[in-house]
Image: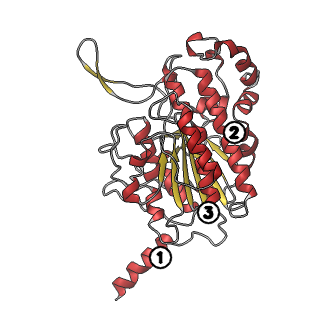
Amino acid sequence: MRVIVSIILCIVLAHQAWSDDRKTETVILITIDGMRWQEVFRGVDNAFFDQQEFIAYKKHHGDFKQQYWRDSLNERRAALMPFFWGTIAQDGQLYGNRDKGSKGELGNRYHFSYPGYSEILTGIADDDRITSNDKILNPNRTILEWLNHMPENNGKVEAFGSWDVFPYIVNEKRAGVPVNAGFEAYSGSGAEVAFLNKLQTEVPSPWDTVRLDAFTMGFARAALAREKMKFLYIALGETDDFAHEGLYDQYIRAAHRSDTAIAELWAWVQSDPRYAGKTTLLITTDHGRGSDSLAAWKHHGRFPYTKEDGTQAVSDFKGDDQIWMAALGPDTPALGELSGGETVKLNQVAATAAKLLGYRFEDSHEKLEAGEPISAMIGK
């Protein structure tokens, strides 16, 4: 009998609220694919401005420079991401400015998207099984699946991604979590959803596996409006794909659009009584980019390859393991831009989100253990 009581007590303790004064009832996790910390904290890089190979809209290049270039670093980054620097830096927290000794790192050895997203959502860098961007069902349980299996959260967890691999990363069918990604129509109701579904078939994407982020954010907004969510994941993708093509001006414009979309989402959340004062935003990226040459910024990832002399090697883009994070919400102290301190890691995101919602995250891996919550984000 004592053993049974102990087991029940452990289960209760694992799921109970961490404190009675916790205000967060909804967490919205947003990722901006392959967005470098350098632009987040420094603004646009002048080294790319007049490199014609990195410019897509050459006839409007002067307008681009006028919009994003400023003489001071603080003004440049505010011009690029005004919500980050006008709101999050004032009322929330920003991690990853290596110029000030604040570091963010990923833990997986591959430094590309599927391993990065899996690490964010599961709290684990499973280097033995998550080894590619292939459409393979994730053997590990994400925080979405974990939350959705609790009766109080069932049906209140969803994911929206621009990249068509997310149903596999979340393992949609096993998880029982709706994942709208790629070029899928959204099953939600209403005139706005119908319009977005129609428009998505009419507006071409530059890529065959990634849709434009406006559709991803639009569908996510519709889900939040439909009913009060417990956890919503939004994965924006344009930044990474424009960067891979070497189009720096389009990479920058995509980052600015992401900031604008997040700002509009936050303003809407604060206007809705179901979410106002009860919602926390967590924002990060799945990986960094190369930083040791002008050409390296286009690339990331560690891949085996054969050199011209026939020997085997592994590609390595210095800096692509460097990430950043942001947090904004009623339980997150307004520390602003962090200097120094402990290194934050991707494997801490899931546990941090869980703790904000009042839970202790329990990973599903047999040998690895998920990262600990970032205590400063919770303020406890």
Residue 31 in percent (x, y) is at: 55, 43
Tag in front: 1 or 2 = 2
Q: Mark 3 or mark 1, which has the lower sequence index?
A: 1
Dividing the picture into quadrants, the one containing residue 25 is: bottom right
Q: Nearer the viewer, residue 301 or 274?
A: 274
| 287 left or right, relative to 270 | left
Q: Residues within 10 Å of mark 1 (few under 14, many from 20)?
A: few
Amino acid marked by disc 1: Val
Residue 109 in percent (x, y) is at: 38, 37
| 88 left or right, relative to 317 | right
The span from disc 3 to disc 2 (Cα, nearest Å) is: 23 Å
Which quarter of the rendering shows the N terminus?
bottom left
Dividing the picture into quadrants, the one containing residue 253 is: top right
Q: Residue furthest bottom?
A: 1
Give the residue drawn at x 59%, y 17%: 56
Q: Which mark is residue 12?
A: 1
Give the residue drawn at x 60%, y 49%: 193
Q: Secondary structure at mark 3?
A: loop
Q: Which mark is residue 227?
A: 3
Amino acid marked by disc 3: Glu
Amino acid marked by disc 2: Thr
Q: Secondary structure at mark 1?
A: helix
Residue 100 in percent (x, y) is at: 64, 35
Kindly identify which residue carries mark 2.
260
Give the residue drawn at x 65%, y 43%: 94
Q: Residues within 10 Å of mark 2 (few under 14, many from 20)?
A: some
Q: Mark 1 or mark 2, which has the lower sequence index?
A: 1
